[in-house]
Amino acid sequence: MPRWLVTILLAPLLVAPHQAAAAVTATVYYKPSAAWSTVNIHYAPSGGAWTAVPGVAMGAAECAGWYRKDLDLGSATGLQITFNNGQGAWDNNNGRNYSTGAGTVTISGGVVGSTSPCVTTPTTPAPTTPPPAGTTGQMLGGDPRKDSIYFVMTARFADGYAANNRGGSQHVTSGNAANNDPMFRGDFQGLINKLDYIKGLGFSAIWITPVVTNRSDYDFHGYHGWDFYRVDPRLESPGATYQELIDKAHAKGLKIYQDVVYNHTSRWGAKNLFVPKVWGAKDGQWDWLYSTKQDGQEYNPLEETNGRPYNGDLWETAEPAGNTCRNWGTPTGQKSPEGYTIHNCQWPSPTSGMFPSSLYHQCWIGNWEGEDARSCWLADDLADLNTENTTVQNFLIDVYNRYIEMGVDGFRIDTAVHIPRVTWNRRFLPAIQSKLLSKYGSERAQDFYVFGEVAAFVNDKWNRGSVNHSAQFFTWKERRDYSADDTLAAREQFDYEQQQGTGNQPTSGNAFLNGNLYHAPDHTKFSGMNIIDMRMHMNFGDAPNAFWNGKDSDDSVNDATYNTVYVDSHDYGPNKSSTRYAGGTDAWAENMALMWTFRGIPTLYYGSEIEFQAGQRIDCGPTCPLATTGRAYYGDHVAGSVTAADFGVVSSASGQVATTLSKPLVKHVQRLNQIRRAIPALQMGQYSTEGVSGGMAFKRRYTSGAVDSFALVTLSGGATFTGVPNGTYVDAVTGESRNVTNGSLTADAGSKGNARVFVLSLPGNPAPGKVGTDGAYLK
């Protein structure tokens, strides 16, 4: 997520709701197999005795398919649970029992949740502006590994409706005004207009930056969420609401992955949760900063005065009733850059007492590999939520359930590392799964793709030895019980796992073949969160380095075939570079060849297909024009018309977009997408380098039902594969056919960025033959 800090202004005070002590009772909801007509719950309170077998009968709940039992736990704060049908069939969580806290407990399909399945009204205050009617849809579905992802910063991609463009208060000082380049320029209409461009490149999923209404001086990126219930109006327009974007993308076979933030809100808090009051005054110095108060007027980012939206809802001169910010309005002794007196409580801060500790954390991060990295503020424009608080949890769960209801296809989770894993595993991930189960059923629910940003900006396997801050750590469930209180549990989990260290973490063979054979992966210990492959990202200075480092980490990931793999992004380039990747066209071609054939889901940051802004600073906040950065406006490069006949196939194009589509890397990524879509082993297969000599070379296989796909891959050079099945292999790049009779095949991809993908023809699964047309690299 963008981490440029900008000093801005404004915000209101609500008294935090009183949190009653948790009752020592549990209301357990269970959804059994449809074949069960009777359900018993067999349980033991923490530290107590088990009920006599078969337990006690559960009654039908008030919603169809669920059973309910209210339990008195005495002084216990948690319990162990199993279920049975009284006829010998048991659900004991595969021998581990279900370990839960008190309060509401839901269990369905092996997933433990904490929100009643029979309650449909939100547990948070109703939004001032309810979601508009008709905001519901269905995700496309299908295994997410079949897709490749195109990542766009919506506000910087393509402008389809100039009337919602906004420059904000930094428009002139940043230099954007001189370029006629407002920070909010791209929008959903622009993205809708260019869906055929993205499909024509061959991508089938689009990752977009956060859509919730933001509030800061420089918030085009979307990570300063203020009204989580409302889509930012600077992105929408008539005929191009967020729901219409989702629906129109789906109509073209394109998925929408929404970037979401659980860790923090804007510095002005979050509407419907808590918004702090700040000191302000029209005192001759600060008049320019503060709006004249208007009764009933609210913040609307579309309504600007001198680049500033209304902020009269945020400031007060006299100390307001219920204020908790210390030293209200007294001078701090510091001056602003303009030379104006700065006052206490003028700007949000975690240490001033302005935010209630029940809802927000109260400290700054001091150690990025310490416990405080999970319980303190990242920056002054990112108010860090107390995600261990029930009110906060219910607020976030309710918010993001609404977007699942709209039919988005997945969530990219921002700043996931800054929330304890046990909180993800107890609260947020089960809540996502519970919503998906209720909307789609158990089979389709698995198609929703969740991938987290665990920002471990290091080149090695573990983040400076800290397992709690390493990406792969978040793909696993908890392996022991912790206190029922989430704050205590977070600390216990951190200490326990740090003591276990890197040498005592779970391992997995889910990404690896057994010899030449695919095996059913074991996801019983999967947390529900996949990850951005930070190790490959950090090592993508060159493809061979990324390949060897990626392989080295895969045994510590629950299933690395689901990793999101990219070279650079809106935050960093490889090796935590502050610039967009500038290794050259040949290096880009080789990186792409690896991403599209190796395990994981290939992902491309907008414009990389033409090396857009190569070598430019990715982000400098408002200190330089956006046009000089890696977040520059891309619309000029896709101006004109384009029609996609299929994924990776453009039937017509005119204007500047036709020139863009003629670039060598565009042709390269189109063909890579065509090849990958034709070979299931490249999409979902496990891999092995056993019996493989060469550089970047490996074998992959995927077997499921009638599908059996086996491929031998070598990139940018030669390789010999020994001990492989005999039979006829056909190269998807050249169409060359080889008949293997001695278990050995030698292939040479030759030049940098080229590939050989020899696919074994099997009964009912013939090799696809040559896929696509030769280009500058694949030939």
Image (cartoon, rainbow, N blue to C red):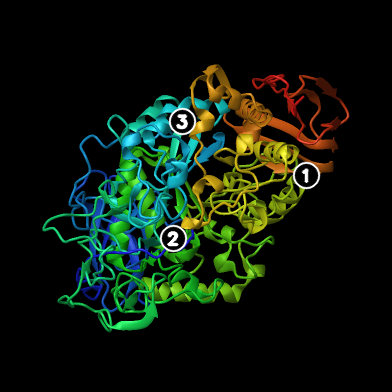
Q: Which amino acid type is marked by label 3?
A: Leu
Q: CA distance from mark 2 to mark 3?
A: 29 Å
In the rendered image, the quadrant that contains the C terminus is top right
Which residue is pictured at 21% across the width and 46% down the height? Answer: 63
- Report the front residue among 189 and 17: 189
What secondary structure is marked by label 3?
loop
Q: Quadrant of residue 472?
A: bottom right
Taking 490 as reference, is 54 left or right?
left
Which residue is pictured at 42% across the width and 57% down the height? Answer: 92
Please state the horizontal and vertical placement of residue 170, each as a whole percent of the image: 40, 55
What secondary structure is marked by label 2?
helix
Q: Quadrant of residue 605?
A: top right
Q: CA distance from mark 1 to mark 2?
A: 33 Å
Q: Earlier in the sequence, mark 3 or mark 1?
A: 3
Residue denoted by label 2: 425
Q: Quadrant of residue 316?
A: bottom left
Residue denoted by label 3: 254
Q: CA distance from mark 3 to mark 1?
A: 33 Å
Taking 749 as reference, is 614 left or right?
left
- Report the front residue among 354 and 289: 289
- Report the front residue among 751 and 441: 751
Taking 315 as reference, is 432 left or right?
right
Q: Which amino acid type is marked by label 1?
A: Thr
Taking 291 as reference, is 610 left or right?
right
Tag nearer the camera, 3 or 1: 3
Please state the horizontal and vertical placement of residue 734, each as a whole percent of the image: 77, 21
Residue denoted by label 1: 689
Which residue is pictured at 39% across the width and 80% down the height? Answer: 334
Q: Earlier in the sequence, mark 1 or mark 2?
A: 2
Above or below for 9 versus 400: below
